[in-house]
Amino acid sequence: MGLMVGACLAFAVMGALFRAAMQDGLPVPLVPFARGLFTTLVMLPWLLRRGPQALATRRPGAHLGRFAAGSCSFLLTMLALLWLPLADAVAILHAKPLWALPLAFLLLGERIGWDRAIAAAIGFAGVLVIASPDLAAGGPDLPASGLAAALAGGAAGAMVLVAVKTLSTTEPPARVVAWYAIGSVLLWAPVSAFVWQTPTPRALVLLVAGSLCAMAGDFMASWAARRAPVGLLAPIEYVQIPAAALIGLLAFAETPGWGLFWGTLVLLAATLYLAQRSQGTG
């Protein structure tokens, strides 16, 4: 559990660092490029040791689908973090498990009971609560562009979950990560070159620090998944929301509204129920 809490805190800090870097003028495509480059460099010893066999696969199409979903998810996440208050963006993006349910039904043919479908619908109601204005405090509506990015980012993130689950039947995790990292470098390098603006020293430090936090979060989440059941880890991920709210308050002077609080509780309850039902039927 401690590892998962650490991963959530690392991801919360990552989002804040990347957001600050983009607000400092860093072009958005440089963020996924940097993350892919850092991941590739970390995996380079393994790639060199294994040689071409490390990336050998009979399922290039499945890897391509996972890469497309991951690229869309990461880009949309960055836009949501840039356009929405930090905690609201993180909370809406955490609807990913709710999106995964209908996608698993449509793409994998998984059976879904009425109780799980109702739980997912209740979870989406929590998203609506977060997205609505805080009427009691006279708060404004969240920007439509940010909401669209966060909702689409959550759906694309769910596609990543489905794609990874499909690949896991034949592909080792390291190969899946390597394909995605190398693909990110190949895709975002020319895009970054096209929109290139020399980063300020501050933006560069924020970008590097955010990439390091992302890698630390990935490793801690992976280690946590090996040591604890998914049903226990899923609700712990929501630690990221209050962490993001605190960072948003201290670093960006963003005061969270009651809609975030109540909507997150609804999301957490729905996700916890779905995780327990999945564990019971798995």
Image (cartoon, grey):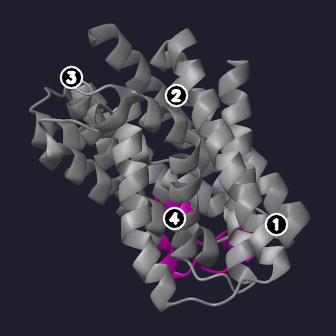
Give the label, 2 or 4, closer to the camera: 4
CB under 8 Å between callouts 2 and 4? no
Q: Which mark is residue 234?
A: 2
Return the disc, 3 or 2, that comes first in the chain's sequence. Answer: 3
Q: Position of residue 109 (x, y in %)?
A: 9, 32
Give the label, 3 or 1, closer to the camera: 3
Q: Is residue 150 above or below residue 223?
A: below
Return the disc, 2 or 4, that comes first in the chain's sequence. Answer: 4
CB under 8 Å between callouts 1 and 2? no
134 in the magenta segment: yes
Which secondary structure, mark 3?
loop
Q: Local crowd at mark 3 within 10 Å, few (<14), some, or many (≥20)?
A: few
Residue assigned mark 3 = 169
Q: Local crowd at mark 2 within 10 Å, few (<14), some, or many (≥20)?
A: some
Q: How far, Cα to Cα, is label 4 from label 1? A: 28 Å
Left or right, 25 with respect to 43, comes to right
Q: Local crowd at mark 4 within 10 Å, few (<14), some, or many (≥20)?
A: many
